[in-house]
Image (spheres, rainbow, N blue to C red):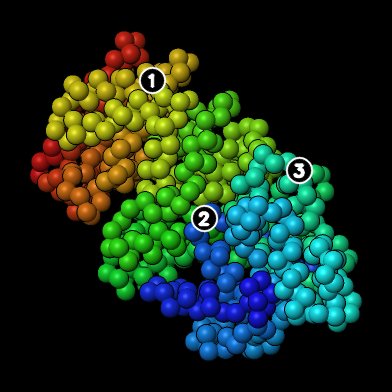
């Protein structure tokens, strides 16, 4: 039993003792099915705090011959499978947390890559004293020598594989050497001999270092294409509902805050860290976004790529943006277009991805709030920031029925967020109004083209269960008059599906005159 070679099961034991533990052990059934096959090279990438490290600890506890984990797994789902005991604690495991090893190397002022290899080789020498020499320093060769002399194959579990690419992105020589090292470890006929399973986790997919990737033999399961491992990293909706029931928190509000990543095979996937915090603290808030990725979003939106600013506006207003993800080089230094920015934000978890339609969108309230803060802090987004600042007061003026002030504020928003060529476009007016009401998202679900009564309301704001603000129906008109909009809302009964808010619904009609570029507004309280 060592730290890196044949580790014990204490880390997984701590996870099982946690107040909230969600059983993801059927991941083991999948990894068992690919042992010693061409599919044995697995790389799972997800944002921070999505449960990647938890899964890695579980796999190490199951496979490592350095511990006895039968009791730990006896009540988990994997224990009910036919081949459960076939690999239980019967393998030579190497478990690496690249981020921790990197930190140790820095603290000891040692070469980072050599320190990783040295740490593992020192422990391998204790296990295989006749196979490892004091002069050995290159881990791939040591593993090959051990296999040649003993026939031992290894399961290597690597957490935070992309740490160097994120933390040392400017050190080109280190990145090059690291990728060469990984190539020697995981690709080629020699690696096939000593590897039984290679399991890696990280935030970024494997870097496209050159035309032939150093590790193009890996099967990657990313935020873009997670199947068939979607359910094993992150919480499913069923799992979240069980947590909400057990801890007496509102499921609908939990969904509003933390849902948004939807996949055809399992449906919604939630961020585990945020859901657990909300349940244990009994308070909704932005938990995951405080884990260190905020700086990434702020830097990303500061790029001066064509179309980036306009698309950020659309995303903030609740729209979806079509993206091309194929050219992303899977690192933080080769960003060449707005599509690279959006693809990076998908992998970081700040945007959700609709695979069928190839679209991105802001997934939930937690992320929307962080996007707003990042925009306000960005020098290149100063115009948007002004609109967001105005939107703080717009909701209050609307609820108070101050129609003139609302018209004035929306006019400014329309001017700021619409180019001259698109100014008279009805879609641009809707987008401008959506972003003008951006801060309403803190308390409201905002729905464009909400089906209700005998038609579709242009914009409907439905308050959450936990606020006492009124529901709002907003109708947009161009070259007509605001009275027409109010009349249409009533005649077509756009409030028909808002029965739970009756006696607390505000009707808002906004008209835009193309010739004068003036906005007018009427606000009424719906009366039964």
Q: Give the foreground label among 2 and 1.
A: 2
Which residue is painted at 35% across and 33% down in the image?
A: 434
Classify residue 379 as left or right of residue 131: left
Which residue is painted at 32% across and 66% down in the image?
A: 280
Q: Is residue 412 visible?
A: yes
In the depicted view, which residue is nearer to us: 97 or 325? 97
The Cα atoms of the two marked residues, 3 and 2, are separated by 26 Å
Could you tell me if the residues under marks 2 and 1 are in contact, i.e. CB atoms within 8 Å?
A: no
Could you tell me if the residues under marks 1 and 3 are in contact, i.e. CB atoms within 8 Å?
A: no
Where is 12 relative to 503, above or below?
below
User: Residue 400: image x %, image y %?
Assistant: 14, 33
In the depicted view, which residue is nearer to us: 513 or 277? 277
Q: Which residue is mark 3?
A: 173
- Is disc 3 placed on a helix, strand or loop? helix
Q: Which residue is mark 1?
A: 416
Which residue is painted at 63% across and 41% down in the image?
A: 332
Classify residue 361 as left or right of residue 395: right
Q: Which of the numbered marks, if any, corresponds to residue 48?
A: 2
Classify residue 68 as left or right of residue 173: left
User: Residue 133: image x %, image y %?
Assistant: 85, 72
């Amino acid at each position: 039993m060592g730290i890196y070679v044949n580790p014990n099961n204490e880390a997984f034991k701590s996870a099982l003792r946690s107040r909230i533990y969600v059983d993801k052990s059927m991941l083991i059934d999948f990894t068992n099915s690919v042992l010693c096959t061409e599919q044995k090279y697995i790389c799972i990438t997800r944002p921070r705090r999505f449960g990647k490290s938890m899964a890695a600890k579980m796999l190490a506890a199951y496979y490592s011959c350095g511990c006895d984990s039968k009791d730990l797994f006896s009540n988990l789902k994997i224990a009910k499978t036919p081949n459960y005991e076939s690999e239980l604690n019967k393998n030579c495991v190497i478990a690496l947390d690249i981020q921790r090893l990197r930190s140790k190397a820095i603290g000891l002022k040692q070469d980072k890559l050599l320190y990783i290899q040295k740490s593992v080789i020192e422990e391998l020498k204790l296990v295989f004293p006749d196979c490892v020499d004091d002069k050995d320093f290159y881990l791939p060769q040591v593993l090959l020598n051990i296999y040649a002399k003993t026939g031992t194959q290894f399961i290597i579990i690597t957490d935070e594989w992309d740490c160097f690419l994120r933390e040392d992105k400017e050190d080109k020589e280190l990145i090059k050497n690291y990728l060469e090292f990984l190539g020697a470890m995981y690709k080629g006929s020699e690696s096939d001999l000593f590897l039984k399973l290679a399991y890696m986790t990280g935030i970024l997919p494997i870097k496209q270092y050159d035309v032939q990737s150093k590790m193009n033999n890996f099967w990657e399961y990313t935020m873009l294409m997670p199947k068939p491992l979607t359910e094993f990293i992150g919480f499913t909706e069923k799992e979240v509902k069980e947590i909400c029931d057990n801890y007496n928190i509102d499921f609908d509000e939990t969904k509003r805050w933390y849902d948004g990543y939807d996949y055809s095979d399992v449906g919604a996937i939630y961020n585990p860290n945020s859901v657990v915090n909300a349940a244990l603290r009994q308070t909704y808030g932005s938990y995951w976004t405080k884990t260190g990725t905020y700086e990434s979003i702020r830097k990303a939106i500061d790029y001066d790529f064509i179309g980036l600013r306009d698309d950020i506006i659309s995303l903030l207003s609740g729209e979806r943006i079509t993206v091309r993800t194929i050219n992303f080089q899977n690192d933080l230094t080769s960003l060449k277009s707005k599509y690279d920015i959006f693809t990076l934000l998908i992998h970081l978890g700040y945007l959700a991805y609709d695979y069928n339609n190839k679209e991105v969108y802001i997934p939930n309230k937690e992320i929307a709030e962080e996007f707003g803060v990042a925009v306000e802090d960005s020098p290149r987004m100063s115009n948007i920031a002004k609109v967001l600042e105005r939107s703080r007061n717009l909701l209050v003026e609307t609820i108070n029925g101050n129609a003139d002030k609302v018209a004035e504020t929306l006019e400014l928003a329309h001017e700021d967020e619409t180019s001259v060529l698109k100014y008279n476009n009805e879609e641009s007016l809707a987008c401008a109004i959506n972003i003008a009401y951006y801060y309403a998202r803190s308390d409201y679900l905002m729905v464009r083209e909400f089906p209700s009564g005998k038609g579709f309301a242009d914009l409907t704001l439905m308050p959450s269960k936990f606020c006492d603000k009124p529901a709002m129906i907003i109708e947009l008109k161009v070259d007509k008059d605001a009275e027409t909009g109010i009349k249409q809302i009533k005649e077509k009964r756009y409030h028909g599906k808002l029965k739970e808010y009756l006696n607390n619904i505000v009707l808002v009609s906004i008209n835009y005159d193309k010739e004068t570029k003036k906005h007018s507004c009427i606000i009424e309280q719906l009366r039964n």
